[in-house]
Image (spheres, rainbow, N blue to C red):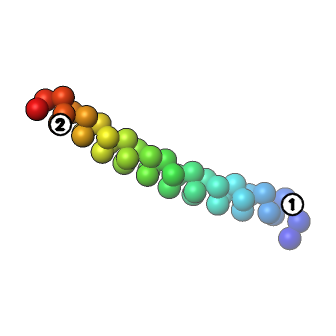
């Protein structure tokens, strides 16, 4: 395997990881926002 083969693989892997991190981040943010709203309205 030379670099031209390795680079797309790394990009694919990092994109998958980035997507997973983004989803987790959004879910956590959503939880925090919902908790804040609960405290705000009660």
Q: Residue at position x 25%, y 34% from top? A: 36
Check disc 1 and report its element: helix, strand or loop: helix
**Are discs 2 and 1 less than 8 Å apart at CB?**
no
Label 1: few (<14), some (14–19) or many (≥20) C-alpha neighbours in 10 Å: few
Where residue 12 appears, as percent x and y from the top left, is 65, 58
Q: Nearer the viewer, residue 10 or 27?
A: 27
Residue 16: give its label. none
Would you name the residue on which mark 1 appears? Answer: 3
Residue 13 falls in image quadrant: bottom right
Tell me the quadrant of the picture where the N terminus can be found.
bottom right
- In primary-sequence order, the first of circles 2 and 1 is 1
Label 2: few (<14), some (14–19) or many (≥20) C-alpha neighbours in 10 Å: few
Q: Nearer the viewer, mark 2 or mark 1?
A: 2
Q: Residue at position x 69%, y 54% from top? A: 11
In the image, is residue 20 above or below residue 35?
below
Would you name the residue on which mark 2 appears? Answer: 38
Tell me the quadrant of the picture where the C terminus can be found.
top left
Check disc 2 and report its element: helix, strand or loop: helix
Where residue 14 appears, as percent x and y from the top left, is 64, 55
């Amino acid at each position: 395997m030379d670099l031209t083969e390795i680079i797309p693989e790394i990009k694919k892997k990092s994109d998958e990881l980035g997507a997973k991190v983004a989803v987790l981040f959004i879910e956590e943010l959503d939880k925090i926002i919902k908790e804040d709203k609960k405290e705000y309205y009660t």
